[in-house]
Amino acid sequence: MQVQAGDSGLQEWRTRFLVDASGRDTFLADRLALKRRSRDHASAALYGHFRDARRNPGTAEGNITIAWFEHGWFWFIPLKDGATSVGAVCSPAYLNSRRVDPEAFFRQTIAMAPEIADRLAQAELIGPVTATGNYSYASTRMSGRGYLMVGDAWAFVDPVFSSGVYLAMNSAALAADVVDSVLDYPARAPALCRRFERTVRGGVRTFSWLIHRVTSPVIRKLFMAPRDFLGIRSAMVSLLAGDVFRPGPVRSRLYLFRTLYYLNFIADWPASFRAWRRRRRDIRVSSGAA
Ligand SMILES: Cc1cc2nc3c(=O)[nH]c(=O)nc-3n(C[C@H](O)[C@H](O)[C@H](O)COP(=O)(O)OP(=O)(O)OC[C@H]3O[C@@H](n4cnc5c(N)ncnc54)[C@H](O)[C@@H]3O)c2cc1C
């Protein structure tokens, strides 16, 4: 493999095992043609950093705020240096409707979310506005002979719940154990990699189910009127904290949450069906644009 290490020019390295942690550059997935755009989700993002955005009062100052709007949802993330990261995750169709420059479009989009617009009334944009097209993908494989992928190098899911860094770090920690064992016991590599894949896929799948539905009317309804029915609320909190990689009570309560979701879906089927159709259309449109 060719490596650029510091100023010493290109070098040829032979490795016993390769861990791809190249993030959305998807170093190996591109070379092995394994990368697939998500068929279950289509979203795009528009974001920038602001100074003097109005934060939550008191000890809640550092809390993240999420706001829904007509075309998706906003994140409002206070950063340590006083800046605030604000972004709109929307359908690729909405992003494609842009006829003005990204900053003007971002400001038009912010105006659609009164809560966010209000917090930014006195704020100043302190960097460029970035637009990212449909960005959810996964590679068909996570590991193979002599390699594995961690974090975004394998898959990127919409970071609705700020799950990206956690998922990446968790897969890296699991991968470190795999590599440690594989270097000592190469014959065990296939079984260890299979287990690694199963664990990471299971956790990401659990997150993804919720993320794919987060803008649906049913999820909004359940989230806006939370009750700790049979421990489901606690299970959701555990999920959001990243406890999705092991079987146990959290998993079973999440299945209960899914049942509640489908019951509510049926109870309000016209609105749910419309939202479901819109989601499928967005996926079709963005796949067609590939
Ligand atoms: C718009 C947006 C908003 C997000 N918001 C959040 C959020 O609020 N919370 C959250 O948890 N996550 C968020 N994420 C997701 C999060 O950023 C990623 O999931 C996370 O950074 C993945 O970590 P990683 O280590 O896999 O990849 P990265 O953090 O991307 O790191 C990959 C590194 O590899 C380097 N690299 C790439 N190719 C090569 C190469 N060939 N040689 C050497 N180095 C290379 C890159 O320069 C980079 O430093 C967001 C992502 C996006 C796009």
Image (cartoon, helix red, strand yellow):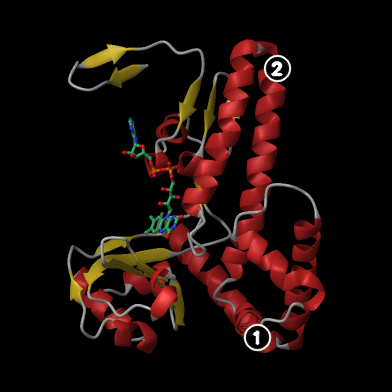
Q: Position of residue 223 (x, y in %)?
A: 62, 79
Q: Position of residue 236 (x, y in %)?
A: 67, 67
Question: Left or right: where does residue 249 sit relative to residue 289?
Answer: right
Query: Hey, what amino acid is under mark 2?
Result: Arg
Q: Which residue is mark 2?
A: 188
Q: Which residue is mark 1?
A: 225
Residues 33 and 73: in front is: 73
Query: Hey, what amino acid is under mark 1?
Result: Ala
Local secondary structure at mark 1: loop
Q: Position of residue 282 (x, y in %)?
A: 49, 69
Which circle's residue, 1 or 2, is located before the other in the chain? 2
Label 2: how many residues lie within 10 Å, few (<14), some (14-19) or many (20+)?
few
Label 1: how many residues lie within 10 Å, few (<14), some (14-19) or many (20+)?
few
Q: Quadrant of residue 257?
A: bottom right
Is residue 209 visible from the viewing direction of this image? no
Question: Left or right: where does residue 93 sit relative to residue 254?
Answer: left
Q: Nearer the viewer, mark 1 or mark 2?
A: 1
Q: Residue at x 80, y 53 (%)?
A: 248
Q: Quadrant of residue 258?
A: bottom right
